[in-house]
Amino acid sequence: MNDITSTELKERQANGTAPVIIDVRETWENEESRIEGSQNIPLGTLPQKLDELEELKEQEVVVHCKGGGRSASAKAYLSQQGFQKVRNLIGGIQAYQQG
């Protein structure tokens, strides 16, 4: 799937159609700032969390980090694991907070 802009994500949140949002930053980064409704699963722990995420394989999932690099890796990994609707938040939380 195509990646998602912060504008589109905010619109989806506002109208109640927000996808599942996974923050792949480290826990301390998530504690400093977070996107409302997101769940924090640091990139390095994704392989251990796959069983918990199994139910999301058919759902739209947005991954984000600070600027988009780690979440691009998370998108590639989840796609390889059979997740069909993974999107990366373009520009990460930095773009989200600026928008």
Image (cartoon, helix red, strand yellow):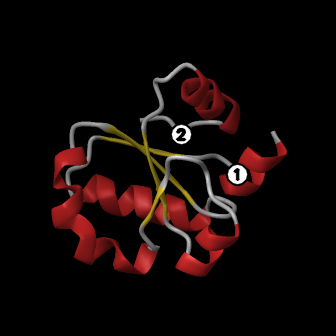
Q: Nearer the viewer, residue 34 or 19?
A: 34
Residue 43, x across and y down, in percent = 44, 73
For the point 17% across and 47% down, the residue is 55
Measured in 3D between alpha carbons, the distance from the residue under mark 2 to the one under mark 1, in whole angstroms, is 10 Å
| Kind of residue at disc 2 | Asp
Residue drawn at x 30%, y 53% is: 79
The answer to which image quadrant residue 11 occupies is top right
Relative height, residue 23 to residue 26 (above, below): above
What residue is rendered at 41% in x and 80% in y?
A: 44
Quadrant of image for the N terminus? top left
- Quadrant where the C terminus is found in the figure: top right
The amino acid marked with disc number 1 is Gly
Residue wearing tag 2: 3
Q: Position of residue 5 (x, y in %)?
A: 65, 36
Counting every numbered tag in the picture gives: 2
**Percent position of residue 86, x then y:** 38, 44
**Residue that badge 1 annotates:** 91
Task: Determine whether 78 is above or below 88 in the image.
Answer: below
Which one is in front, 22 or 44?
A: 22
Q: Is residue 69 left or right of residue 62?
A: right
Circle 2: element type: loop
